Amino acid sequence: MAMVVGNSWRWWLTAGGAALALLPLGQGAPMVAVVAAICGLIVVGAWAWGTRSGRPAGVAVGVALIAGQGAAFAFSQWPRSLVAAPWLDWFAVWLLVGVVCLAALVIDWNMQHFSAPHLTGENRTAGRAQWVASMATLTTVVLLCGCGTGVAWLDGDGKLRVPARNDEVLPLPASLRLVSADICADGGSSGNCTAEFVVMAADDADRTTTVTRLVEHLRSRGWPLQPEHGAYRGSLETAGILNWTAHRMWLYADVEPVSELPPTAPPEAVVIYIDNL
């Protein structure tokens, strides 16, 4: 019973790490929430059960790890009128927090190995076993996830790209209706995609009116569209911590070029293009 009470702070810290799953869950991303729960639990739990520093220092560092992961998520996912960054943005930073935790465990072990008279006999053996288990688990997770993140980076030729999302254009005002949407109608290698949103007037207005309505709508959503050579063009930077490519939007003010009009689109439709090159 005394051991359970003495370790209660470790259980609370571990639960706090797992509770980080509530952040992506609040965004309506249950699968990503599972990833956050596992990562938060392992990073914070590794420190909680691996440290020999005692409750005051253990809680202080554990809370700092939780706060660091929470702050990284908040900064990453706060779009600030920019294109929202994907979950890989904050997850990569969480892996760096895991590396910091590894370093903290190594420093903690070296300090306590010579200055912990209260850890003797069985307690010292148990402490060593917990430290080894924590280090092994955290190192494995950081290496595996780090390699996966590195592969994603290299696959993009060093450029991090996120496909366009529906909410960069939708919902449309009542005066417009969506005919079709394809977030990767045209693309190549390295994750580059061109999205196409085919839009028409809801009241059979002419194309000029449709274009005017669309431009007003898109500007209200933060797109800095400007007229340029018979089209409206603009780009938005991608938010987040890592260096993501910007999204570039354009739509034709005049009649849509036949070579670029999607086969299923009516001649009077206006197509919004967004690419991530």
Image: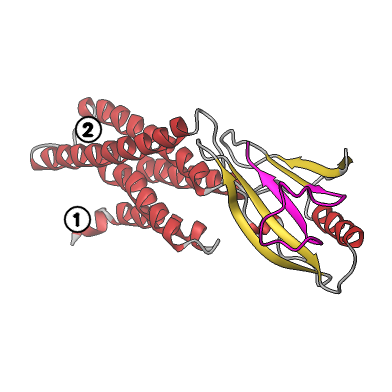
Q: Residue at x 68, y 55 (%)?
A: 262
Identity, as a three-letter code, of the amino acid under mark 2: Ala
In the picture, the disc for residue 116 is 2
Tell me if I can see residue 254 in this picture: yes
Query: What quarter of the picture does the C terminus occupy?
Result: top right
Which of marks 1 and 2 precedes in the sequence? 1
Counting from the top left corner in percent of width and height, residue 8 is at: 30, 57
Residue 123 is situated, as x and y percent measured from the top left of the image, at: 13, 42
Query: At 91% from the left edge and 58% from the top edge, which residue is drawn?
Result: 208
Q: Which mark is residue 3?
A: 1
Give the number of the disc on residue 215.
Answer: none
Q: Nearer the viewer, residue 153 or 46?
A: 153
| Amino acid type at image mark 1 | Met
Of residues 97 and 175, the one nearer the viewer is: 175
From the top left corner, tell me how far across and down residue 167 is, in percent: 66, 58
Corner quadrant of residue 100? top left
Color scheme of the displayed model: secondary structure
Secondary element under disc 1, as helix, strand or loop, is: helix
Q: Circle 2 — which element?
A: loop
